[in-house]
Amino acid sequence: MQGVLLNTEETDTIADEDITTYHYIRSRKRSKARVISQILDDHADLQNDTEVIIDIFISFLDSKYKAIPCNINSFLYLTSGDMPNIPKEANMVLENPITRDELHTAVKNGKRHKSPGPDGISHEFYKYMWETCNEDLLDVLNNMYIEGEASTGQKHGHIVCLPKVNNPVSPEHYRPLTIINTDYKLLTRILAYRLRPWMEEVIHHNQYCGRNGKTIYDVVATVRDIIAYAEVSNTSLCLLSIYFSDAFDKISHAFLFKILEKYGISTTFCQHLQNIYEGATSSLIMNGHKSNPISLKCSVRQGCPLSMLVFAMCINPLLTTLDKWLKGIKFNHNSHKMTVKAYADDVTIVIRHPEEIDAIREILHNYMEATGANINETKSSVLALGSWPQAVPIMNIRYVDNIKLLGFQMATNSNKSAKISWMKLTSKIRSQALENYHRTLDLASRIRYVNEVLLATAWYTAQILPPPK
């Protein structure tokens, strides 16, 4: 039963629902979808032998996670101005041993029905056995953090590759996700709790990830208002939506620890964090086989509770440098100028004049050289607003009629944005409803499913874009 729950999506099960044939079928479909039966090799030949397929992926992942150098000149370019610093008292908090209360909060806040890491211990185990194991678990985490004795096994993870596109035929068409041990996740969750209160001192106001009280809605609503402003005033501007390929994987560890020091984070905390990152490995889980460990010499692992904050701090110099050089727009005299809006790696740049394009190109180039980031110009896009001439080239990025921003379709005016977004949303809701029609649910459970799943997506969109008339 537990295995079926772990192999289904969160929306496949609602509170107190019994496991039925529906869940077994969904679990089987997901397992079948994870089987990779063919892949192109380096010579563009299609391979269907399991061992050859695994070797191709291992070679790809070895290359993907090799060490990325930090170009010191580009680093200095991005950090040449006044860098924000966390207060001294923050370092005292960060360096302290883990407390029992911190650990208890981390255990209580962990999500249920998540696949356990390589050690096989699930989050539920620590939650249900708290009174029995809390002292031993606290000793384990402090041994990992304060003593710097996190073992290779504790830092080891399992990589599963999920398709990013329909009919994938190349390793690049798959997203590698890491399943890590629960004790590692508890430790990094506690460190994230400690860092978060100080992020307002460090993170630029144009970054909406990692800051208390800021959400996806804030960044989308701001972009929506910029589009409305350009529409009403016929202001000449455009939105450049940047797509970073494998954004979390392409972070140089050398850059990461240099930038943490620039923020005034103590050498002691940086060393504690470095002990957690150094020597981390993962094994590829594919088609029922497990590979030998692959060294992770770059990246912040998705699935790690600390990764989002760490990534926000790494991309912060890009946002501050763009804000320094671009004119942006202001809705009133008291508001911040709006030059760039970001939620983690989802970055939208506001361009007022064609003369700013060269500066943007130089800033992005230095960010890529310093961090190892890679911009996919094919998947990036430009949305012309007001009287902006589409004849103006912006790198090799194409102009489009609408851009996708954190699940919303944003067009050249609010009406178009609402129509496109709601058309896709209603189609998705209809499809989900049909798929779940034969699910064995009583009336109360059906009502709960409609409210918690189907209507939830509608409310999400309605908060930014009301349904079109």
Image (cartoon, helix red, strand yellow):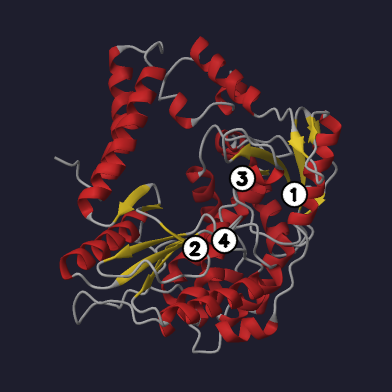
The secondary element bearing badge 2 is classed as loop
Distance, label 1 to label 3, CA atoms, is 18 Å
Mark 4 residue element = helix
Between marks 4 and 1, how big is the CA–CA gap?
A: 16 Å
Front tag of 2 and 4:
2
Q: Are marks 4 and 1 in contact (CB under 8 Å)?
A: no
Circle 1: residue type: Gln
Amino acid carrying label 3: it is Asn
| Marking on residue 154 | 1
Residue 10 position, x and y percent, is 47, 31
Residue 252 x/y as whole percent: 68, 68
- Residue 100, picture quadrant: bottom right
From the viewer's side, name the closer residue of 176 and 167. Answer: 167
The label nearer to you, 2 versus 1, is: 2
Residue bearing mark 3: 134
| Label 1 secondary element | loop
Residue depicted at 68% across the width and 38% down the height: 160
For label 1, count other residues whose C-alpha is less than 10 Å away and answer few (under 14), some (14-19) or many (20+).
many
Q: CA distance from mark 2 to mark 4?
A: 38 Å
Indicate the amino acid at tag 4: Leu
| Image quarter of residue 437 | top left
Of mark 2 and mark 4, the one earlier in the sequence is: 4
* Front tag of 4 and 3: 4
Choose top left, top right, bottom left or bottom right for residue 129.
top right
Tags 1 and 3 touching, CB below 8 Å: no
